[in-house]
Every structure is written in C-alpha cells, then in structure tokens.
Amino acid sequence: EILTPAFGNGMDGVLRHHSHKLRGILNGLDPDIWNPATDTFLAGNYTARKREAGRRTNRDALYEELEWQPSGNDTRQPLFGSVGRLTEQKGIDLLTQAAVRLLGQLKACFVVIGDGEQEYIDQLLELQTRYPGLVRVYIGYSERLAHLVEAAADFFVMPSRFEPCGLNQLYSLCYGTPPVVHHTGGLADTVVDATEDNLENGTATGVVFHEPTADALHVALLRATALFNHPQHWRRVQQTAMQQDFGWQESAQQYLSMYEELV
C-alpha cells in the first residue's frame, strides 16, 4: 500500500525504487495479557475447545458492567462489538451508517467502547438514543470492558480506512470473536474471509469487505449475521480463529532473522 500514491504520502516513487528492501512483519499480541484461558479481566475463562459457557458468562458480565439489558435478547441475536479510537481512520462513520440500516432490518445488537472526535461521539450517542435496547455506547476507555467485549461479542467490527497492522483483530481471533474488517493493511494480512470456499476448506476466520463504504460494511454485517445463523459454520470459524498464532514469539523471530541477514 505504501508503494501507491494513495498511501505513499508523496514517497511512493522512492519506496517503489527501493521496494526490494521492504519487508513487512506483523504486530504481535502478548499472550500473558491477551489469553482467554488466563485473562484476569474476564468473568469466565475459556479455551478453544470449551468456550461457550465462558463466553456466555462474559456476556452477562459485560451487560452488568454497562448496566444494560438488550431488548429481545436471545441466542439468535448476534452482538457486534467495537473498541477503539473514534476517528475517521477507524471508519466509525461507516459503522454508524451501516448499523442504522442493519437495525432497521434484523435483530442485532451493538456495543461500542471508545473516545475521540466529538462528531463521531455525537453520531454514536444519537444511535443509542434511537435504539436504546439494541445499542450501548461507552465513551471513554476501560481495560476491563475492552477485554469483556472481545470475550463476549459474536463479531468484532473494524471498518478502518487504513490500518498498518492493527491489534484488535488479533485479540478477536485469539478470543474466538470473528472480526469484520475492511481489506486493508494488517487487517487484510490476518483475517481470512468466510467465503464459501474458505468455509469449505476450514480456513475462514472472519468477514472481509473491500471498499471503505457504509454500503460495503452493511453487506458484510449481513453476511456475518447469516454466518451466525448457521451455527455449524460459525462455530467452525470461531475454532479456526482461535487456532491462529499471532503471539510476539513469531514476530520476534522474523525480526531476528532479518537482523541476522543484515549482518
């Protein structure tokens, strides 16, 4: 992406000239902090093989922390979560626009945790006022809530316009919360779309959309809801996601190998 005019910020020509020197190494997560089996912020720990009871416990804890009980809540109603900075880069405007359309069509809930630009705060709070039983917004940051959302939501939404790597999608994969992401940067590198072929061969780990628009995100949320309503496929995607290894050990080894080559 940095080899293109859109993302090169005037340096794309130089970068293309030196493209043989470029190497991308993914970010990593700290398994001592982000591990659903040992996470001290969770109300219930769980593993890939035994996750349903733990995730239900964490959802109950999340609702209690937020002092919120979704209207018509049942196991057939997906919960979409989002945690992060409320900025244009993160595509929060896309999320609010797509959420309005989804809430008018299907039964679904949204929990958004974050802080940032007032314009986007106002959009989210307006959405909460309009759909108090389906949308809960927490303005600010809470480490416990951030962990609970990862462990309780059915999907984690990251509609970033650009994202050099991103960490939340890595947390989501680790916690069995399939990410819904825009195909950009590290999001494209780490999330495998739940296409028919990828579901069939067992490689799907989330839902990917390719244009940074509310329309494209809306379609992705519809696809995620359809996946959720197909329990066999959805649980398989969860299982596959939790089998991925994005710990720092792998990234550190790649850095070490690169330095060894240089000397």
Image: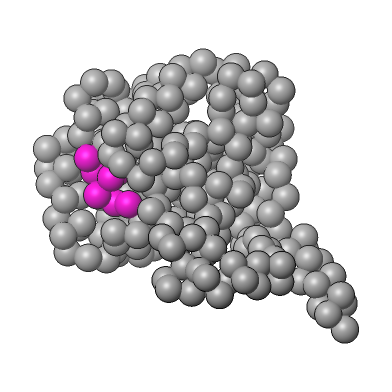
How many numbered marks, from 0 up?
0
Q: Quadrant of the C terminus?
A: bottom right
In the depicted view, which residue is nearer to us: 101 or 232?
101
Answer with left or right where residue 133 lies relative to residue 247: left
161 shown above or below 85: above
The outermost residue toward the bottom is: 263
Locate residue 254 relative to residue 187 in the image: left or right. right
Colouring style? one colour
* Percent x, y of residue 18: 65, 73
- Against 4, residue 137 (above or below) is above
Could you say where residue 128 lies in the image, as x and y percent from the top left? 18, 43
Q: Residue at x 64, y 26 (%)?
A: 198
Left or right of residue 185, residue 127 in this image: left
Task: Place residue 142 in its image quadrant.
Answer: bottom left
Location of residue 13 in the rendering, given as x and y in whole percent from the top left corner: 52, 70
The secondary structure that most of the magenta stretch takes on is helix
Residue sitting nearer the eye, 57 or 229:
229
| Residue at 54 percent of width and 63 percent of height | 3
Question: In the figure, residue 21 lies in which quadrant?
Answer: bottom right
Residue 57 visible in rendering: no
Nearest the viewer among 232 and 32 is 232
Q: Which residues are magenta?
A: 91-97
Q: Choose top left, top right, bottom left or bottom right for residue 73.
A: top left
Q: Name the residue at 65% across, 67% down.
A: 19
Q: Is residue 204 magenta?
A: no
* Residue 199 percent location from the top left of the image: 63, 22
Q: Identify the residue shown where x is 83% and y is 80%.
A: 262
Q: Is residue 8 visible?
A: yes
- Residue 18 vs residue 97: left or right? right
